[in-house]
Image (tube, helix red, strand yellow):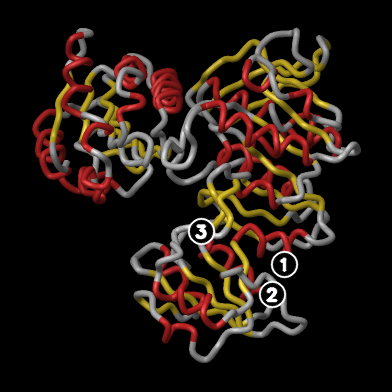
Amino acid sequence: MVMNHRIPPEIRHIHLMGICGTGMGSLAGMLQERGYRVTGSDQAVYPPMSTFLEKLGIPVRSGYGPENLDPPPDLVIVGNVITRLNPEARELLRRDLPCLSLPQALAHFFLEGKIPLVITGTHGKTSTSALLAAVLDVAGLAPGFMVGGILRGYERNYQVGSGPYFVIEGDEYDTAFFDKGPKFLHYRPHLAVLTSIEFDHADIYSDVQAIQAAFARFIALLPQGGLLAAHGPDPRIQEILSRAVCPVATYGLEDRWDWAAREIRPHPGGTVFRVYRRGQFYHEFHSPLAGEHNVLNTLALMPLLERIGLSPETMAAGVAGFRGVHRRQEVRGVKAGVTVIDDFAHHPTAVRETLRAIRAQYPGRRLVAVFEPRTNTSRRRIFQTDYPKALAGADLVVVREPPDLAKIAEEERFSSARLVEDVQAAGRPAWYFPDTEGILDFLRGSLQSGDVVLIMSNGGFDGLHQRLLDSL
């Protein structure tokens, strides 16, 4: 059956299937702010998204079913967690109700008449897009934005915005059950950043070449009057830059790139670095973010901000005032001399760079890495030999058994026990636990004053961060 993507001439009531996802919940808030009546349904209705929607007064039905489409909404937006076999999706198809995917809806309702600024790449999308939105806001440009993390100071991840620009985190994950292409193909990019291309999302991409091909399609969407900021040292990016019909500005840590960051100096409040444009000194920046990877994320925005017309001084003020994103090197608390940090890192490259950044921020202190392989890719054995090297920067490593392993074919499953054995073989103390309770008990008995505990997961990790602080 063909999906009905016809948009009704008059829309009052919009229903979101899978409303408790980060992007869908944000879209619900934005649509309500625009004056629409919004309802939703989801299988997993729990905090923080359930309380967020409750505060907005958006009714959410727990579970999926045909009754959720009564009375019939004018438009249904379908999240990418919804399968064709979902009972509510089957009823949607049977009734032939108008429907859109999240990216289609975002483009229709919020990108029309705007200049989209799209941040893409395997790594750094959330931090980079959040920083861009904050800098534009400080500059008085009132941008709209939707990113994948909660901005500190805003305490939400979206803003409708009244200015000419809209900042979007360009996700390469698939769009919906009726559209298996990446989300970012719907975002009408005008100015864009491409941070990196590595293998990820093993559940939908067969290999890194398939991911590279998706980014090549994205680059080809940029108009001649647009601009692409591309990480110059990445060979996979270099291989597809010929697809761009717009100007390309490269960035990196060496003078051979159009934009370069040098003289990088970590300090307790973040990082100081100097930016050079085509070999000429441009400006010095004081960033509250730690790590070389965050220097590159900040540098990536310079070509776009210059095109928009911001002065180096305005850029520097925006960067210095950025308060960061929750769950990105977020200090959750200090108790009994132990610092507990939360981070979203899960890809081996992100794990390695996050450890490097935290090490630079806390020199001379014991660094304890606690890792939960939870994503569709990290639960597979694809990076089995990469994680031991990624975790080499920690003084002590603690790894949890991946959750929901039964959903992965036995021959494809990642082994946390083997990871720990490999870390131990490399001369680092490491421990494996089948559940979070074991990790909590171990940490309570092992931590000392002065330790820094970096907890890495793309999920809630059973509330380990706060439970550990409460128990110290």
Instruction: Report the residue marked by disc 2.
Output: 34
Question: Which of 438 and 445 lies nearest the eye of the viewer?
Answer: 438
Image: 222 above or below 178: above
Q: Residue at x 60, y 14 (%)?
A: 264
Mark 1 or 3: in front is 3
Q: Residue at x 69, y 75 (%)?
A: 34
Whole-percent x, y for residue 188 in the image: 76, 50
Instruction: Report the residue marked by disc 1.
Output: 109
Image: 417 above or below 426: below
Image: 251 above or below 374: above
The answer to whether marks 1 and 3 mark residues whose Cβ atoms lie closer than 8 Å is no
Q: Amino acid at mark 3?
A: Phe
Secondary structure under tag 2 reads: loop
Q: Residue at x 25, y 39 (%)?
A: 409
The answer to whether marks 2 and 1 mark residues whose Cβ atoms lie closer than 8 Å is yes
Whole-percent x, y for residue 88 in the image: 44, 75
Q: Amino acid at mark 1?
A: Phe
Secondary structure under tag 1 reads: helix
Instruction: Report the residue marked by disc 3.
Output: 177
Q: Is residue 195 left or right of residue 441?
A: right
Question: Which of 175 and 248 lies nearest the eye of the viewer?
Answer: 175
Q: Is residue 32 left or right of residue 339?
A: right
Residue 79 visible in the snapshot:
yes
Occupied quadrant, residue 386: top left
Secondary structure under tag 3 reads: loop
Q: Amino acid at mark 2?
A: Arg
